[in-house]
Image: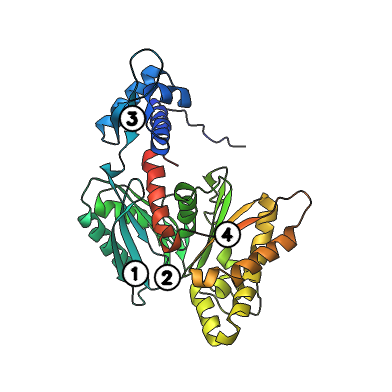
Amino acid sequence: MQKTARRSLRPEDARRSNLALVLQDIYDGPALSRADLARSTGLTKVTVSDLVAELMASGLVHEVGTSADARPGKPSTLLTFDPGSRDILAIDLSAKDQLRGAIFTLGGTLVTRIDRRLDGAVGEEALRAARELAAELIAAATRPVLGLGVGTPGTVDAAGRVLRAPNLRWRDLPLQELLSTELGIPVRVQNDANVAVLAERRFDGGPDDLVRIHISRGVGAGVLVGGQLVGGAASDAGEIGHVVIDENGAECPCGKVGCLETWISVPALTARVQADPQHRDQVLAEAGTQLGAALAPVVGMLGLAHVVVGGPSELVDGPLLAATRETIAHRTQSDFRPELDLKASSLGSDAVLMGAVALVLLSELGVA
């Protein structure tokens, strides 16, 4: 049997990991001293001082005075993160017939928004529109750019290649490589639902074990286990929208019939409600039952206690969410299982954009 080659840890890898440890504590916490950082990270004071010097030289960290410690001796100099030292560019390709772009600070504060209509464009036309939007964003940036994060529908591999995005009619598209080459900056491309679940954890205090359903032009799920994204062997973990739930249902853009996406994507839900407005609540409740049936095996198998559903509040909140919760509880009920915490996302329509920010923070600075 062939053995997998074992990669040894290089000194630069260890240094990058230590920098991320220190920066994570400074990013998350109140002003800290070098001694505080040595205690929290387990690194030596000499190592911490060296790493802090590098972070200060980069402009990411600066000193903000001294501590009010009552202990004898020289007061400690405190350090804080500078969220305005860089810009992060973000693009959301998941909305129906629209590309959404924005510039954020490192702290996740919105600086500039640039949206563009797709007007039905798919394939090469949609790609051209995405590239033009990326160029507009970098031209609008007023500070050094840390990187660009992109949330796209479809299956995306670890190299940022869109393996398949049926709604955009993309297949085997090296989107990350294309954008990085054109812009000359770090670019990270990931599935829209995956970046949205990163946003829930980074910007809304979500737990390390979490499933987030992203209802937009399509339907996907981002899965965090132990704080780590679950990608799957074929980079398609979370592709719940293309699980068949109705063998006699409508045809899906992926080519199958009766996928969950044909029930609970925004276009599908909107069409169903418009076709029977007098029974709006029943229509949404039925969609929630379908979502709950699809989610129950995942919740039961992974022992999850937290699920967030993101999408337009007028569709998600109310009957759909209630029926989803009831169906999952009924199908996974156990004397040993805690009550499921299932709620609507509080991040609204910016979840994917903010997730793109979280993706860049993670990939470029190691801030999770």
Residue located farthest toward the top when viewing the structure as drawn: 73
Name the image quarter holding the C terminus: top left
Relative to the observer, which residue lies in front, 365 or 318? 318
Mark whose residue sits in front, 3 or 1: 3
Q: Quadrant of the N terminus?
A: top right
Q: Dot 2 surroundings within 10 Å: few (below 14), some, or many (20 or more)?
A: some
Q: Which of the numbered marks, if any, corresponds to residue 289? A: none
- Give the CA distance from mark 3 to mark 4: 36 Å
Contact? badges 3 and 1 (CB < 8 Å): no
Q: Is residue 308 visible?
A: yes
Q: Is residue 340 left or right of residue 210?
A: right
Left or right: 172 as drawn, with respect to 50: right
Residue type at the position of mark 2: Arg
Q: Horizontally, is 129 left or right of 243 in the view?
A: left
Which label is found at residue 79? Answer: 3
Question: Given contact means CB atoms under 8 Å apart, are the residues at marks 2 and 1 in contact?
Answer: yes
Give the percent coordinates (x, y) of residue 121. Answer: 35, 74
Residue under pointer 1:
126
Mark drawn on residue 343: 4
Q: Earlier in the sequence, mark 2 or mark 1?
A: 1
Labels 2 and 4: the sequence-earlier one: 2
